[in-house]
Image (spheres, helix red, strand yellow):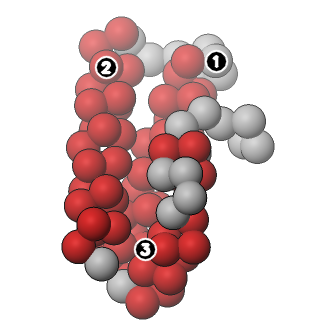
Amino acid sequence: MSNTPHTLGEEFPGQLNQIHALKAADPAFASLLQEYDEVNDRIHLAETSVAPVGENHETELRKQRLAIKDRIAGALKDA
């Protein structure tokens, strides 16, 4: 989905090089990025009604994405 909102490049502008370096060096961080992309894709599918879910479930997915984003931001800060 090339037009998926909330891509890591949008969420962390100017930090893509750091993200790629940390992804290559840290398997746990790479897994976290994969988890973010999977949740983000599920939200996008729900929002576009391709794979609709209930409002409560969509809200929980958004909360999950935010929590993952916070963990990514923390890892980038600590790196």
* Image position, residue 69 (x, y; %): 34, 48
The image quarter in which residue 48 lies: top right
Q: Which mark is residue 30?
A: 3
Q: Are marks 3 and 2 in contact (CB under 8 Å)?
A: no
Q: Are marks 3 and 1 in contact (CB under 8 Å)?
A: no
Label 1: which secondary element? loop
Instruction: Evaluate whether residue 57 shows in this view.
Output: no
Residue name at image x 35 percent, y 29 percent: 62
Q: Nearer the viewer, residue 47 or 7?
A: 7
Measured in 3D between alpha carbons, the distance from the residue under mark 3 to the one under mark 1, in whole angstroms, is 27 Å
Taking the image as shown, residue 69 lies to the left or right of residue 67, namely right
Give the answer, above or below, for where 55 lies relative to 75. above
Query: Which is more N-terminal, label 2 or label 1?
Result: 1
Residue extending farthest to the right is 2
On-image quarter of the C terminus: bottom left
Q: Mark 1 is on which residue type? A: Thr
* Image position, residue 76 (x, y; %): 33, 67
* Image position, residue 51 (x, y; %): 58, 23
Measured in 3D between alpha carbons, the distance from the residue under mark 1 to the one under mark 2, in whole angstroms, is 15 Å
Residue behind mark 2: 59
Disc 1 packing (10 Å; few <14; some 14–19; many ≥20): few
Residue extending farthest to the bottom is 25
Q: Mark 3 is on which residue type? A: Ala
Instruction: Evaluate whether residue 56 shows in this view.
Output: yes
Residue name at image x 57 percent, y 29 percent: 44
Residue name at image x 43 percent, y 80 percent: 22
Q: Which mark is residue 48?
A: 1
Q: Mark 2 is on which residue type? A: Thr
